[in-house]
Image (spheres, helix red, strand yellow):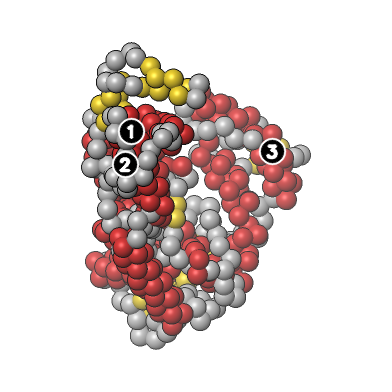
Amino acid sequence: MVKTRQREQDVPAYAERASQSGSLPQQDSATTFPMPSIIAKYEKYTKAIDEHYAKVNEENRKFDNPSKHIWDKYYNTKSPYYVKGLTRREREICAESERRVLHGLPAAVNSYDPVIQKNFGGIMSDEEWNDEVRGGMNDSINRLFAENGIDIPEGAELRLRVDPYEYKIHAGGVDEALARQIEEALNRGNNGRYLYEHLRWCNPANNGFEQPRQYLYDTAYQEKAVMWHFVNDMTGLDMRELENRDGVIYTPDGRNLWDAVTEQYNEKRANGEMDALPMESLYKDYQVFVNEGWDKEGERGLTIGYKNGSLYDIDTDYGYGPGQREWLEDSRNRHSQYWGNYRKEQEETLRREKAEPTAFEKWLDGQMAYTEEVLSELGNRTYGKSGTLLSQPNLKAMQQLLDYAVSNGRVVPLTKEVLRLQGRGTLRGGLDIKA
């Protein structure tokens, strides 16, 4: 989930459900940093969408034909349940969401959904989310420093590096004793993991700016880090510390490490704890890393600076720290302007739709008017309301009207009598026509 350039058309963030791209990890009780994941960003929007459409679904299911009722609400202007005041885009979103929930699927999270617009005014951009997370991390770090009696010397530029394996935070730029004290205070729960993930999201290249060198190194090293985590998740072992001999890594009890990995993977799969993985492909990658070894890795990871109570991004002018935020304000202004223009267009669309009947309304009004003429002749009246002689009813028009009425539940048969019109069966006599 990395974008290389921000586009204006991407501003109205749209996301399929977080449940389709991963679930939120459990928050460790010792963790004080906010969760940076984009999944966490959508959590409040997802909650609002779930609650709204679950309630609406209960109402829809009270009707004999819930799918038809949903269609009536958003597209049939003659229905007593028709929802007014929505644009075409909003109608499509609401109708699709209600159909998905009706069939047991989750509704999508969409910035244009009236539920999101009403409660939040849209979905915040990724840049705004990163800034919110950064503020929470600043607050947490300052609180931990205060609680542990840590005082950063004036003018010192503290550096916090997070390694990509165990997610440990390493302090630099201060004397060794203070560095150890800082590390002890910050390395709690998932703090290191959250800081590392946050830094990856804050890569200036995500917003179209030049990429700092540390991100180039980090990207190049990700495959190795991912393999390390996979092995560690399966066995709890650190590949870097195991014996690597003749192209085989051995566990402390002398087993082939990959055999132990495969055994645990199969067990987790059998227990439904994880999805299927391309193990043959993973083994090929594993062999590459086994042959390369794990040397010269002491300084791997991502680094951020800290000064005067705030974190700041290094080697860039386009970050989230003091003096680096001009681009962010421009992004916020564009975001605000986009939604301001959208709401103006929305108001204009609603005024136009209210003033002008839709093509369907025009067609239906015309059919109803002519049907009155047809029914007049069927009632042995020689002349219609317009004064013209009705020598032959327009059976095609009447057939179309009846077809439409039957297909949309407007005509309910009360007898078994059938009138033959142009070789097609049509109801006659006991017709219950609802307005």
Would you name the residue on which mark 2 appears? 384
The residue lying at 50 percent from left, 70 percent from top is: 8
Above or below residue 20? Residue 350 is below
**The residue positioned farthest toward the top in the image shown:** 416
Q: Earlier in the sequence, mark 3 or mark 2?
A: 3
Would you name the residue on which mark 1 appears? 377
- Residue 220 in sight: yes
The residue lying at 46 percent from left, 42 percent from top is: 20
Position in image of residue 330 (x %, y %): 43, 80
| Front in this rendered view, residue 193 or 426 | 426
The mark lying in front, picked from 3 and 1, is 1
Crowd band around label 3 with a 10 angstrom C-alpha radius: few (<14), some (14–19), many (20+): few
The residue lying at 27 percent from left, 49 percent from top is: 83
Position in image of residue 369 (x %, y %): 33, 44
Q: The disc labelled 1 sits on which kind of residue?
A: Glu
SS at mark 1 in the image: helix
